[in-house]
Image (tube, rainbow, N blue to C red):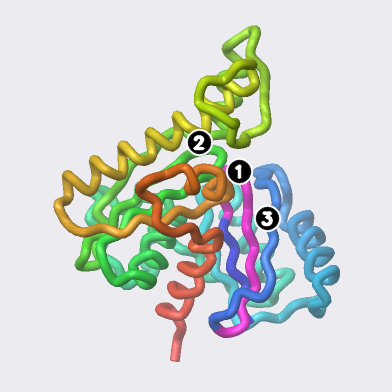
Amino acid sequence: MLVAIDVGNTHTVVGIYEGEELTHHWRISTDAERTADEHGVMLQVLLSAAGLGVPLKPEGVVIACVVPPLNGTFEVLARKYFHCHPLTVGPGIKTGMSILYENPKEVGADRIVNAVAAYDRYNSAVIVVDFSGTATTFDYVSSRGEYVGGVIAPGLEISMNALVEHAAKLYRVELARPREVVGRTTAAAIQSGFVFGYTAMVDGLVDRIIHERGEKTRVIATGGLAELIAPESATIEDVDEFLTLKGLRLIFERNRRP
């Protein structure tokens, strides 16, 4: 059994693997102020509700964290509540992928993990579009399996927050597909801007990346908001909500000691 933990700026996703099968998963809000004990109690409740034994004693714990204050928190969590030393994705970890970024330490762990999982899936050039609430990232992997780089854009939720905060007469609406592009209410107009406008940005950037790189490229989306945008996109081929967890499992296997 393996526990995979993806700590993002907006949400933290926890998955339980039995071999290659993801048997359980949970998505919780990320809170940098939450302690290891608070996380531990929350996870114990989730594990018990799923019928899993507590305390859980997995073979290992693998973590990708992009919130620096929580790195130590989740390492303590792994040792105290799962009784093992975690593998945290970062410098010195075997990923099986060359990183061509000018400063590899600047690349978020989740972006590398996504790239590893996507290349393992297609074994070809691939773009990973990761839709989180805070940022939407585009990561390009070459046909030789090299992480080349990518694009970072504001996420849908943080964009909504900025719009509501700075426009006195606009208000928060549900992030949902409107019936038509030309909205005839303020809510529909905002939804159109976010869903159709964001889709146009995604397709435009993907097209530019493929044109610039000049090789046949697959496109996969992941993240909590991928299901909202992907159906409208002309470039996204697949959606895998758990791509990051799959990448974490692969990296754990590549760092397993004999």
Where is residue 100 drawn, in percent x and y? Answer: 22, 55
Residue type at mark 2? Gly
Residue 94 in view here: no
Quarter holding residue 109: bottom left
Describe the element under mark 2 as helix, strand or loop.
loop
Q: Is residue 33 left or right of residue 135?
A: right
- Residue 239 percent across, percent down from the top left: 48, 58
Seen at 59% across and 31% down, the residue is 179
Q: Which residues are magenta?
A: 7-19
Looking at the image, do the residues carrying marks 3 and 1 touch, with CB atoms under 8 Å apart? Answer: no
Tag on residue 212? none
Give the side of residue 144 with respect to residue 2, left or right.
left
Q: Whole-Å distance between the Cαs marked 2 and 3?
A: 18 Å
Q: Secondary structure at mark 3?
A: strand
Q: Position of residue 51 (x, y in %)?
A: 83, 76
- For residue 10, the mark is 1
Find out whether the residues at labels 2 and 3 contact each other: C-beta distance under 8 Å.
Answer: no
Residue at the spot 69% in from the left edge and 76% down from the top edge: 83
Which mark sits nearer the N-terminus, 2 or 3? 3
Residue at image coords 46%, 55%: 110
Q: Is residue 31 above or below residue 184?
A: below
Q: Nearer the viewer, residue 12 or 133?
A: 133
Looking at the rendered image, the disc whose residue lies closer to the viewer, 2 or 1, is 2
Query: Residue 92, percent across and down?
Result: 36, 67
Q: Earlier in the sequence, mark 3 or mark 1?
A: 1
User: Which residue is label 3 attached to?
Assistant: 27
| Left or right: 252, with 82 as reference point | left
Q: CA distance from mark 3 to mark 1?
A: 10 Å
Is residue 133 in the magenta section? Answer: no
Classify 10 Å Cα crowding around label 2: few (below 14), some (14-19), many (20 and above).
some
